[in-house]
Amino acid sequence: MPHDHDHPHSHDPAMPHRHPPLRPDQDDTVTYWRAMEIAVRGLLIDKGILSADEIRRAVEDMDSRTPSLGARVVAKAWTDPEYRKLLLTDGNAACEALGMDRGIYKLVVVENTDEVHNVIVCTLCSCYPRWLLGLPPDWYKSRNYRSRVINEPRDVLREFGTEIADATVVRVHDSTADMRYLVLPSRPAGTDGWSEERLAALVTRDSMIGVAFAKAP
Amino acid sequence: MAGADPTDPRFVAGDAVAVRALYPLGHVRTPYYIRGKRGVIERLCGVYGNPEELAYARPGLPKQPLYRVRFLQRDVWPGYRGRAHDTVDIEIYQHWLEPVR
């Protein structure tokens, strides 16, 4: 029923009547930090240190990064034992070897096996290998995930649908300082002889954070 | 004796260490839950500017060796509900670590 509200107004069909918009006209809030960002950005542009276009391009570049970059790295490591060795000893060099950014932080890659299941968190904030996976998902930054995965990881993994065998060590990595982490998930069974490209489609963001396994073929 | 230069790494992989139970104010990267706990050095990550200084736009000197330290979850959380062999690896700067003999 279109008129189940109780405010008085004319229902003369010749008079367009007013409802609150479905989305408020002012759909933005200027918080303290946002106001500071706007002010600093304005100053940098006014002083000729950065241009608006450079800032836009940096945002565009960040938004263009997706977990498909990480998936290429993982698929290559699944098919090339030499590359896998490089990835586990020098993650940044391994990114570079595929023509990707090295990243400005040191990349530590941890490998999931039948013996160990790795999962990544940043309990202090939201550290994440953004150059390789793009922006972290909202849940990764939530207090719920950050405070719980550190002390009840098996329960949290179960909520993600990921059951870890009792015999497997669950190893949480708290990304508290200058390292960034990527999980190298286990290669799914039944993918013998698959191309890197086909394998990469099985590698999801969540499997590289460690809250899930790579997709089954 | 190493230690004359605070940027010299004092520990190697496999060393038993304890995290200092200190509660200073300011920007500290050592989470509360790990202070006072005992673990084992997993690897030396490198030598980095001290974030407790960098956060205040100071030069971060002396730099600090940074380690990944591995702890058994049951040593970190009383009543840990997972398996006894589960672990947590954390990055800790050297000035927060002391040797355990």
Image (cartoon, grey):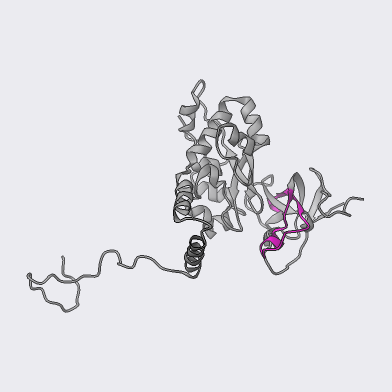
Residue A204 visible in the displayed image: no
Q: Is residue A192 above or below residue B6?
A: above
Q: Is residue B63 magenta?
A: yes
Residue A63 picture location, percent across and down: 45, 48
Q: In this rendering, would A120 be left or right of B38?
A: left
Q: Is residue B45 magenta?
A: no
Q: Is residue A206 above or below residue B27?
A: above
Q: Is residue B8 above or below residue A182?
A: below
Camera-side residue of A188 and A50: A50
Residue in the picture at 77% in, 47% down: B40
Residue A33 picture location, percent across and down: 51, 67
Camera-side residue of A162 and A6: A6
Residue A128 picture location, percent across and down: 57, 49
Q: In this rendering, would A149 be left or right of A41?
A: right
Q: In this rendering, would A18 be left or right of A204?
A: left
Q: Magenta residues?
A: B47-75
Residue in the picture at 49% in, 54% down: A139
Residue in the picture at 30% in, 67% down: A25
Residue in the picture at 89% in, 54% down: B4
